[in-house]
Amino acid sequence: MSAHQEWLPLTPIRRARPLPGHASDSGTVESVSGKQKHNRVALIVFVVVGAVGCLALGWWQWLRFESADGNGQNLGYAFQWPLFAAFLVYAYRRFVQLESGAAERPDTPAPDEPLREIPHDLLPPRPVAVDDEDDDSDAGTRREYNHYLAELAARDADRRTE
């Protein structure tokens, strides 16, 4: 690691006060406001209507598969729609777990645990800028070319003003 790089220890982000429905510093969970309860009822209705709708579409695809003009695509959809319904239920359940704080991240350090420092060899070293003027044998040619480009740009600017 070069001398100009310094690694700072990780510091946790702390909130001034806990959010409603999340555990506070004392370990108690604050009550959920009435608006969030109202939103939860709306989410439950959404999940139930969505899941029932997905199951109904799965049943409809199954009936299409059993009909005379049914094919494998209808059979695939008949199995796919119940999976969509299961995903809606799973997503709502996971949302409730995350909202209540029941599913804490396992990699979150405990308040008593000491902070860890980022390992020095985790990232590749940063590239160091090299002074091209000293090491480059084509520096003169490059300067001439850049001067030529500047002249062309100036001529182009003069033509536009005429």
Image (cartoon, rainbow, N blue to C red):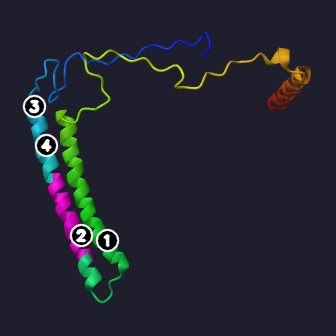
Disc 1 marks a residue whose amino acid type is Tyr
- Between circles 1 and 3, the one closer to the viewer is 1
Question: Over which residues does the magenta segment extend?
Answer: 46-61
- Outermost residue to the top: 3
What residue sits right under mark 1 in the picture?
A: 77
Write the residue at 33% across / 18% down. 12
Answer with mark 1 or mark 3, whichever residue precedes in sequence: 3
What residue sits right under mark 2 in the picture?
A: 57
Please give the label number shown on residue 33.
Answer: 3
Question: Where does residue 156 sit, x and y in percent of width and height?
Answer: 83, 31
Q: Quadrant of residue 137?
A: top right
Q: CA distance from mark 4 to mark 3?
A: 11 Å
Disc 2 marks a residue whose amino acid type is Leu
Q: Quadrant of residue 9?
A: top left
Q: CA distance from mark 4 to mark 1?
A: 30 Å
Q: Main secondary structure of the magenta part?
A: helix
Question: Do tag 2 and tag 1 residues touch (Cβ < 8 Å)?
Answer: yes
Q: CA distance from mark 2 to mark 1?
A: 8 Å
